Amino acid sequence: MAEVTLDDLGIRAGLEIHQQLATNKKLFCDCKPVETEEYSIRFQRKLRSAKSELGEYDPAALFERSKSKSIVYYGNPESSCLVEQDEEPPHELDKDAKKIALVIASALNSEIFSEIYPMRKTVVDGSNTAGFQRTMLISQGGSFETEENKIGIQSICLEEDAAKNLGDKDSVRRFGLERLGIPLVEIATEPFEVGPKNIKKVALALGRILRSTKKVRRGLGSIRQDVNVSIREGGVVIEVKGVQQLDQLEKVVEYEAIRQHGLLRISKELQTRDKWTHDENEDRKDITELFSGCNSKIIQNAIKKKQRIVGISFKNLAGLFGFSPYKGVRLGKEIAELVRFFGIAGVFHSDELPNYGVKQTDIESLRDHMKIKETDGFLILACPEEKTKIVIDQIILRIEHIRDHGIPNDTRLATQEGQTKFLRPRPGAARMYPETDIPPVTISEDELEESRENVPRSWDESIKELQTKFGLNLQLAEQIFDSKYASLFEKILERTKVNPTFVASVFCSTITNLERSGLDSELLTSEQIVKAFEFLEKGKIANESIEIIFESIMSGKSGSIEEAMKASSMETVDESELEKIVQVLVDKNEQLIKNQKERAIGPLMGIVMKELRGKAPGKTVNSLLMKSIQKKIIVMREVGFEPTNS
């Protein structure tokens, strides 16, 4: 980064951890929190924003409403009922979720309230069928420690998880109801000044406290880190949602700090130009007919869909849409993100043209038609007619805000690449109002005492317990504790007598390596994993078979352990048959044995294990192979061939 370093920016961050709780039912009904891809229920809604009790609209809700999306919900009776459909009042608060939340609050030394008031939090993006999320403030204050810092806790809430986003298509957004209503805790830290590399340690330390309770869910989608980021001078608090992985968190904080500083530089550049105002009649024109012959595929596709092509001019802004104080930070990119929010992909700015099929002759025609000077900037927008005015108005407001105030106060979404993109404006106080269907929840002294008694061991103590109980080394104990397979690891060792180090290495190495090669671990169910180790204990498969079986399932080639075994011809061979296979291999490789003697076992072991494909344990193969090699050496000596060391 030019001119300034990350340390110069003075990055301040605050984490919001959303962690699903391991309960047998949802927060306000008896439905099981079961993931599914089969749906027998389908219904459609159109959510609208409503005023708060003070007569105010939440800005985030108003902005979501402007997208005018229809919401289609899909459900399964096993995992959702009339409560999730907002056709029945919520049931009593789940007692287990309440207990777990109190234990977590006690573990963080947070001050628990004696009475808890359920609230409604306005959410009109479709992720909640009712247009709001139920949440309740459990406690405030408290702290936890990392290797280098003591991090304060701002608040802890118990709330419902949102529905699972199944994707958008045109003006329709789809959600699955299986996750809606799963209890989770939201833990917000106090803001702290930290380098991007250290924020990962903060999130890891807090996550380990949660996992130590053994009462939280593991796996993709069960925990989410939102992070608030600001910089020391001129920054505003930007909430970034949807950070799924710790490595991604580090990149997101770094990018967002750089983006904010870059926007401040763009703001200063805007202020150096003559202050412009937008004339709706003069500075925006319908140019659909003018661009009817343009070679741009985006423009031609828009015209075929009966959309409008609009030119928008900006006096004295030539060069500013493409001005990039840092890589990936541009005014043009900010506008493109805003436009995509409305489901529109077609927007070009003057600093990137001619390009994308828009020729110099098209630009000259546009300048003549709208009287755009060389010192002016412009946008070309391909948009449905009914959205044109609101989209252009939002573009104007965004540029004016960046010019006059610097950084827009947004909620943003983390990308897989570690950047952020516009999601919606930050919500205001009008977002929250009391829940009328649920009475206040009291917390008794007995419940407080019970929560304090059930505070889990520290992370260090938990790691030592794993080492002692299962004979794991420190590195493997830490890896299995931090993995999503920790509870499954213990479950397998309760049912079988398989070597714990081998089980841990399968979870922390074998499956991880298969994931890195592009295979999907979500296809590998807990039941299949347990069955594989049960088959291993019974001698139906060898250690080496585990990776082959899991690879077959994670690639989608097999749907079960049995199918994978059949596809790989994985029936184990008995010792007599194995001896014959080994002897044939040794006889074929006399010259190798003559040259290397017992050292020939290395290359021969690789050959025989590849041929067997997991049909026999490596330990057994190694023992038989060594015996056969030694016999071969004796025979060769008897007939006058002395093995050499060449």
Image (cartoon, rainbow, N blue to C red):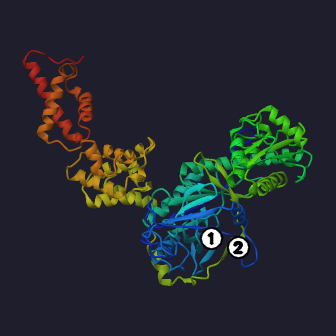
Label 2 sits on a secondary structure element that is: loop
Q: Is residue 287 above or below residue 407?
A: above
- Would residue 563 be found to the left or right of residue 201 on screen? left
Closest to the observer: 48 or 407? 48
Q: Is residue 376 above or below residue 154?
A: above
Amino acid type indicated by mark 2: Ala
Closest to the observer: 416 or 18? 416
Q: Position of residue 362 (x, y in %)?
A: 80, 35
Q: Is residue 125 above or below residue 640?
A: below
The part of the image, by quadrant, that contains residue 375 is top right
Amino acid type indicated by mark 1: Gly
- Would residue 203 be found to the left or right of residue 190 on screen? left
- Would residue 146 be found to the left or right of residue 423 on screen? left
Q: Is residue 374 visible?
A: yes
Mark 1, other Cα within 10 Å: few <14 / some 14–19 / many ≥20: many
Name the residue carrying label 2.
Answer: 50
Q: Is residue 473 visible?
A: no
Please name the residue shown 43% across and 56% down the image. 484
Name of the residue lying farthest toward the top: 640
Q: Position of residue 253 (x, y in %)?
A: 64, 50
The part of the image, by quadrant, that contains residue 372 is top right
* Quarter containing the C terminus: top left
Name the residue carrying label 1.
Answer: 131
